[in-house]
Image (cartoon, rainbow, N blue to C red):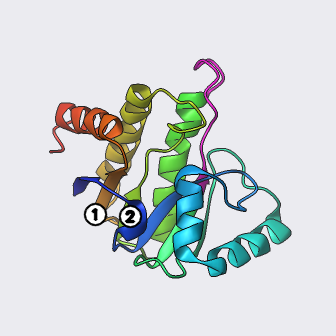
Amino acid sequence: MIALIKGDITKVETDAIVNAANSSLLGGGGVDGAIHRAGGPEILEECKKIVAKQGRCEVGEAVITTAGNLPSQNVIHTVGPIWSGGSKGEPEKLASCYINSLKLAGENNCRSIAFPNISTGVYGYPKKAAAEVAVKAVSEFLSETTLMEKVMFVCFDEENEQFIRQELEKAGKI
C-alpha cells in the first residue's frame, strides 16, 4: 500500500523514516536538520560511529540508525544527488536512494517506511522530475516484493504533494 501525507515526517509513526542526508551524515538543513533536532543526539552519535567505520555515505546509498526521540523506530539516511541538469546520472542516483532505503528497511524487518522528497530542497532537483523517479522506483520495488506493507510519501510543501499525487494517480496507486 502506498499513502500520501502532507505534513512533518518527524511526526510520523512508522517502522522507519528516511532522512535526506548529506554524505557526512552529521546533520544539515531541511529535513536532515529537522530529523536530527527532533530525534536528539542519539541519532548523531550512531551516524558518527557509521562514518568512523565506513567513511562517508555515497550518493544513492543508505544506512540505518535508531530514531532517538522520534515516534518511528528507525531512521534510514540516504544521500540524494545534487541536480546538475540531469545528464550526470541524477535520475538513476535518485532512484537508488529509494530502492536502497527500501532494501535496508526490509533487511531490518521494517514493514512500513516514510519518505521525504529527496533532493528537492537545497540539492535543486526539479520537484516534478523527482516525483516521477520516486513513484516509479517505489512502485517497481513493491511489484517485486511482499516485504513492505506500507510506503508513505510525506510531503512538507504543497507543490511536492501535488507532483507526488499526480504521479501516484498516473500509476494507479491512489
Question: Callout 2, which amino acid?
Answer: Ile
Q: Earlier in the sequence, mark 1 or mark 2?
A: 2
Instruction: Report the residue marked by disc 2.
Output: 113
Pinpoint residue 54: horizontal percent, then vertical percent: 81, 64
Question: Callout 1, which amino acid?
Answer: Lys
Q: Is residue 35 above or below residue 138?
A: below
Pinpoint residue 77: horizontal percent, then vertical percent: 59, 60
| Left or right of 19 on screen, residue 160 | left
Q: Is residue 110 magenta?
A: no
Q: Can residue 108 be seen? A: no
Q: Front-most of 105 and 77?
A: 77
The segment highlighted magenta reads 78-89
State the CA–CA distance, disc 1 to disc 2.
6 Å
Q: Residue at x 50, y 37 (%)?
A: 120
Q: Residue at x 37, y 35 (%)?
A: 131
Placement of the N terminus among the 4 image quadrants = bottom left
* Other residues around mark 1 within 10 Å, as few (<14) / some (14–19) / many (≥20): some
Pinpoint residue 4: horizontal percent, then vertical percent: 25, 51
Instruction: Report the residue marked by disc 1.
Output: 150
Q: Residue at x 17, y 35 (%)?
A: 169
